[in-house]
Amino acid sequence: MRVSILALMISAIAGPVLAQDSGHDQFIASCSACHQPTGKGIPGAFPALAGDAFVQGDETKVAAVVLNGRGGMPTFKADLTDAQIAAALTYVRSAWGNHAPAIEPATVAAVRAKGAAPTAVGLQAH
C-alpha cells in the first residue's frame, strides 16, 4: 500500500516536469531555429516569444497561428500532432518569465477542427 501511494506521489510531482521537458524538446525541434532557444527571436525577422503578450494571451489564437502560420511563419498542422503543439505552446507560455496557463491538446484539436486562421492577432513577424 505504501509503495502505491509513494508511486502516485512521485508521478504527480514528476508529471508536470516531464510535460515541460517534452514541450521544451518540441520547441527546440520545431521553433527554436527562428525564435531562438532563448525565446528572444531575431529582431526584424522573427518575433521574440519571451515576454510577449500574445503568446501569453488567448490560447485559441496562439494555437491557430501555430496550426495555420502567419506572415512568414510556416504552418505546422500537417507536421505536428495536437499533443506536440500543445506541449510546445505550454512550454513557450511558461518559459523565459512568461506566466500563462498550459494549453491542452483538446484546445488545439478544437482550433484545428475550425480550420481557419484568426483574422486579427497581435504577434508580428517584424
Image (cartoon, rainbow, N blue to C red):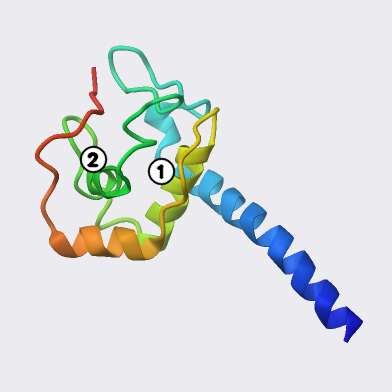
Dividing the picture into quadrants, the one containing residue 114 is bottom left
Vertical side of 21 occupied by 10: above or below = below
Res. 41 image quadrant = top left
- Please state which of residues 58 and 43 is positioned toward the viewer in this rendering: 58
Residue under label 1: 30
- Residue 3's mark? none
**Compared with residue 116, is residue 109 higher up or lower down, i.e. above or below?**
below
Q: Residue at x 41, y 62 (%)?
A: 83
Quadrant where the image shows the N terminus: bottom right
**Where is 85 relative to 110, above or below?**
above
The x and y percentages for residue 24 are 54, 44
Residue at mark 1 to residue at mark 2: CA–CA distance: 10 Å
Total labels drawn? 2
Q: Amino acid at mark 1?
A: Ser
Taking the view exactly as shown, the residue that stands out farthest to the top is 44
**Dot 2 surroundings within 10 Å: few (below 14), some, or many (20 or more)?**
few
Residue at the extreme right:
2
Figure check: 61 above or below 15: above
Q: Residue 59: image x %, image y %?
A: 32, 47
On the rendered structure, is 61 left or right of 117? Answer: right
Give left or right: position of 2 versus 122: right
- The residue that mark 2 highlights is 74
Is the Cβ of the residue at disc 1 closer than 8 Å to that at disc 2?
Answer: no
Q: Identify which amino acid the numbered label 2 is placed on.
A: Pro
Q: Where in the figure is residue 5, as x and y percent of width and height?
A: 82, 77
